[in-house]
Amino acid sequence: MADIKQPVSSEDKVWGAVGYLWILSLIALAARKNNDFIRFHASQGALLFAISVVLMLIPGIGWFINLLVAIVAIVGIIKALQGERWPVPVVGGMAKQFGDWIIKTAKL
């Protein structure tokens, strides 16, 4: 049986894209935590934000890897606006657990 894709509303697409805008990912995660599409993208965005903050502390190579993180975030924004779920390479598998941890820890 083939998976039937649920249509994603324009509002959900915008919230999903906002989920990749660093600190705004936490707002999207808190405001729309019960929406699977938005939670998927906001969790990935929150993880990218956390990685970015840590990388700022590493002189030299940190800024280069941060540039890659920014490019990945831009691709995530595009995919969210297209209504697609796109797992971020390398860290995408950890994003759901990270998002769940944020919601549980911050009691959102």
Image (cartoon, grey):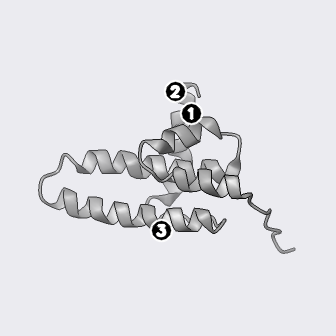
Horizontal side of 28 relative to 72 (left or right) equals right
Nearer-the-camera pick, 9 or 87:
9
Horizontal side of 49 relative to 28 (left or right) equals left
The residue singled out by tag 1 in the image is 103
Query: Which image quarter: residue 23?
Result: top left
- In the displayed orientation, state which residue is furthest to the left: 60
Could you tell me how far apart the alpha carbons at marks 1 and 2 are, in whole angstroms?
5 Å
Q: How far across and down, in percent of the image, does residue 32 sit?
A: 65, 40
- Asked if marks 2 and 3 touch (Cβ < 8 Å), the reply is no
The residue singled out by tag 2 in the image is 106
Amino acid type at circle 1 is Ile
- Asked if marks 1 and 2 touch (Cβ < 8 Å), the reply is yes
Query: Which image quarter: residue 34?
Result: top right
- Viewer-side label of 2, 3: 3
Q: Secondary structure at mark 2?
A: helix
Amino acid type at circle 2 is Ala
Residue at the (65%, 39%) spot, across then down: 33
Mark 2 or mark 3: name the one nearer the start of the chain: 3
Q: Visible in this render: residue 94?
A: yes
The residue singled out by tag 3 in the image is 75
Quarter in which the N terminus is drawn = bottom right
Q: Secondary structure at mark 1?
A: helix
Q: Is residue 90 above or below residue 11?
A: below
Q: How far across and down, in percent of the image, does residue 28 sit?
A: 57, 42
Assess disc 1: are there few (<14), some (14-19) or many (≥20) residues with their C-alpha within 10 Å of its C-alpha: some
Horizontal side of 80 relative to 62 (left or right) equals right
Nearer-the-camera pick, 74 or 101:
74
Residue at the (48%, 51%) spot, across then down: 45
Tag shown at residue 47: none
Q: How far across and down, in percent of the image, does residue 40 sit?
A: 60, 53
